[in-house]
Amino acid sequence: MSFVNRNLKVLFADFLTREINEKEFETTMRRSNSPVSTIWKTNTQSEFYKSTLGTMIKKPNNEVSEALMQKT
């Protein structure tokens, strides 16, 4: 990076620009290929309870926690 007269100039390594220009780059960088609408409809709490981590760590009941917060 260099600044000259308030202008920013950035030079990237050649291997990085080649890697980003490849067709497969976008698909490998995506976390999910499902549309956003399905993520909005997914109940993350029930999915967490189904996961391995969800069986090891018990999350507090959200309704009870909220009720306790309202009382304090």
Image: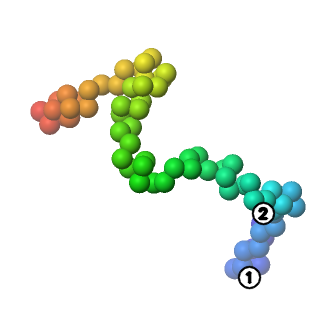
Q: Amino acid at mark 1?
A: Asn
Q: Quadrant of residue 21?
A: bottom right
Question: Which numbered marker is on residue 21?
Answer: 2
Mark 2, Cα crowd under 10 Å, few <14 / some 14-19 / many 20+, is few
| Left or right: where 5 falls relative to 39 | right
Extreme residue in the bottom direction: 5
Quadrant occupied by the C terminus: top left
Image coordinates of residue 39 in percent, x first then y, are 43, 48
Question: Which numbered marker is on residue 39?
Answer: none
Foreground residue, 1 or 5? 1
Question: Which numbered marker is on residue 5?
Answer: 1
- Measured in 3D between alpha carbons, the distance from the residue under mark 1 to the one under mark 2, in whole angstroms, is 30 Å
Looking at the image, is mark 1 or mark 2 nearer the viewer?
2
Image coordinates of residue 42 in percent, x first then y, are 38, 42
Image coordinates of residue 47 in percent, x first then y, are 41, 32
Q: Quadrant of residue 4?
A: bottom right
Extreme residue in the top direction: 56
Foreground residue, 68 or 47? 47
The image's colouring method is rainbow
- Can residue 72 be seen here? The reply is no
- Can residue 40 be seen here? The reply is yes
Q: Amino acid at mark 2?
A: Asn
- In the rendered image, the vertical position of residue 30 relative to residue 10, given as above or below: above
Total marks shown come to 2
Mark 1, Cα crowd under 10 Å, few <14 / some 14-19 / many 20+, is few
| Left or right: where 65 falls relative to 31 | left
Residue at position x 84%, y 60% from top? 18
| Left or right: where 41 falls relative to 25 | left
- In the rendered image, the vertical position of residue 30 relative to residue 59, given as above or below: below
Could you tell which of marks 1 and 2 lies nearer the N-terminus?
Answer: 1
